[in-house]
Image: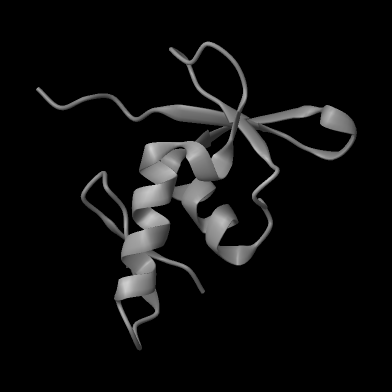
Amino acid sequence: MSEPERTWFYLGKRSQPRGPFATEYMIRQCLSGRLGQNSLCWSAGMDDWQPVFTVPIFVAAIEKSKQIQGKIHFYCPCGNEVYAG
C-alpha cells in the first residue's frame, strides 16, 4: 500500500498560513522562487514551522533538478517528474 500524499502549508505575507498544497506544488514554488530560503513550511508530523530549504524532500528535488541540465522538468522524490515551466 502506498503512502498517502502529504499536504503542506507555508507562511505567506504577514505570516498568514496558506494551504494545504501537494508536495509537487510546493516544489514548483521553490524552483520558481516564490518560496525563498526564509520561507517557512509545515506538514502534519512536524513539530514546528521550518525553512522550506531545510526539508529533505524539497532539498532533494532542488538538488536533483540542478543536476539535470537542459531539461524543463525536475525529479520529485515521490517518483514523478514535475514540470517547472
In the image, taking residue 32 as reference, residue 7 lies left or right, namely left
Residue at the left extreme of this rendering:
1
Residue 22 lies, with reference to residue 8, above or below; the image says below
Q: Quadrant of residue 71?
A: bottom left
Q: Residue at x 15, y 27 (%)?
A: 2
As drawn, 49 above or below 77: above
Image quarter of the N terminus: top left
Q: How are the colours assigned in the image?
A: one colour
User: Residue 23: x and y, percent?
Assistant: 43, 41
Q: Residue at x 43, y 46 (%)?
A: 58
Q: Position of residue 34 (x, y in %)?
A: 69, 56
Residue extending farthest bottom: 70
Horizontally, is 60 left or right of 19 in the view? left
Q: Where's residue 49, x and y in %? A: 62, 22
> Residue at left 56%, top 40%?
52
Total numbered badges shown on the rendered structure? 0
Residue placed at 64% from the left, 49% from the top? 37
| x then y, percent, for residue 75 | 29, 61
- For the residue pair 24 and 60, the one nearer the viewer reads as 60
- On the picture, is 24 further left or further right than 19? left
Q: Is residue 84 above or below residue 54?
A: below
Q: Which image quarter: residue 67? A: bottom left
